[in-house]
Amino acid sequence: MSPTSVAHARTARRLRSAAAVGVAGVALFALRDRVPDPDAVWASVRRVNPGWLAVAVLAEGLSMRLFAGLLRRLLRSGGIRLTRPRSMAVTYARNAVSGSLPAGPVLSVAFTIRELGRLGASKPLSVATLVLSAVYSTATFAVLGLVALLSGDATRVPALIALAAVVVAVLALVRLCRRPGGRRSGASRRILAARDAIRPTGRDRLVLAVLALANWLLDVACLAAVCAAAGVGLGPHTVLLGYVAGKIAATIAVIPGGLGVTELGMAATFVGAGVTGSVAAAVVTLYRLISYWAVIAVGWVSWLLLRDGVQARLAAAGRWLLGVIGRGEDEADVRPAG
């Protein structure tokens, strides 16, 4: 990495740190007079409806399954067939690496490229799969964010200003990419390389967009189900706004998984909508237990199961168990009748 790239990376980290501190500061200011008592939070958690909580778990599981489907569809466009169980294991494992380790996103990319390479995918195809999955996921989340921000009176004008800035930046990037002999940024080069490695059809593009959008919507549904479980009667716009606030906070935070910042962003949004501090804390805690901690736990189990040594031991244990069962059946067959 050149000295200029190192300086740019250092500046980007400082900007992200400052943004994370700013988001946390705003959230703490909004919650300054409503910090919940732990006993009150626990009481709110104990009163949740288990049925709605089960719906939340189901929605999160379906969300992860659709993201794994996005990965499978992209690989299929590149000529690689990936089974559903394998795609689920890779999706959960890469999420665990990305969300729980320092420099997790970088390690997650390396892990995913290695796993896809073991399945026969070339490095350009693996990189293209990751780049395009990020493009579809980011684009559909941007749509959700715009819907959330444009639907509120207080956030409409800032959202329009931000949208105009994004449009100008995208147009400038496209113009730079098309200029003969123009220098292309690393992101634009990766997107163009991904376009060359994977050639999805029009139907594929539609399916990929639907899968990416449905992935986000089911995650929002998980949060909405947790709200219903806690008896919080928030409208769809407020739930979506709190969700977007938490995800944006997690994106700009330098802490793995956006721990702390995500919770503050969501809780501040719900408290601002009139929810008491204890109930808001209970909702955010339960949602994060399902959508973050449970997913991380499943991800690390999946990571272990993807190791060759663990697979060999499990196969040996399975053969031993089948052998024990078979011997027991043989002994039962030859036992004299009483």
Image (cartoon, rainbow, N blue to C red):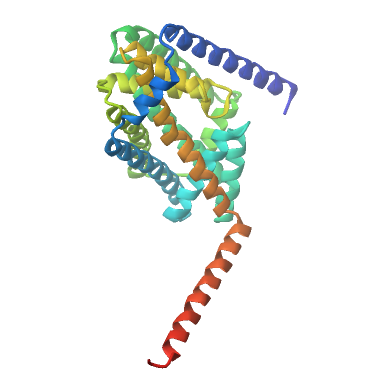
Query: Which residue is drawn at the image coordinates 32% and 40% (left, top)?
Result: 54
Q: Position of residue 120 (x, y in %)?
A: 56, 56
Please indicate whether residue 336 sits to the left or right of residue 317 in the image: left
| Viewer-closest of 135 and 66 | 66
Please indicate whether residue 302 sits to the left or right of residue 141 in the image: right
Q: Position of residue 129 (x, y in %)?
A: 50, 42
Please indicate whether residue 8 sits to the left or right of residue 281 in the image: right
The correct choice, above or below, for 143 with respect to 332 in the image is: above
Q: Position of residue 243 (x, y in %)?
A: 38, 24
Query: Which residue is drawn at the image coordinates 27% and 29% (left, top)?
Result: 228
Q: How many marks?
A: 0
Residue reaching furthest right?
Answer: 3
Q: Quadrant of residue 108?
A: top right
Q: Quadrant of the N terminus?
A: top right
| Viewer-closest of 195 and 248 | 248
Residue 114 visible to the viewer: yes
| Viewer-closest of 190 and 41 | 41
Q: Position of residue 234 (x, y in %)?
A: 27, 20
Query: Which residue is drawn at the image coordinates 43% and 22% (left, top)?
Result: 246
Residue 142 visible to the viewer: no
Q: Quadrant of the C terminus?
A: bottom left
Please indicate whether residue 175 sits to the left or right of residue 182 in the image: left
| Viewer-closest of 22 and 76 | 22
Q: Quadrant of residue 209?
A: top left
Query: Which residue is drawn at the image coordinates 48% and 16% (left, top)?
Result: 169
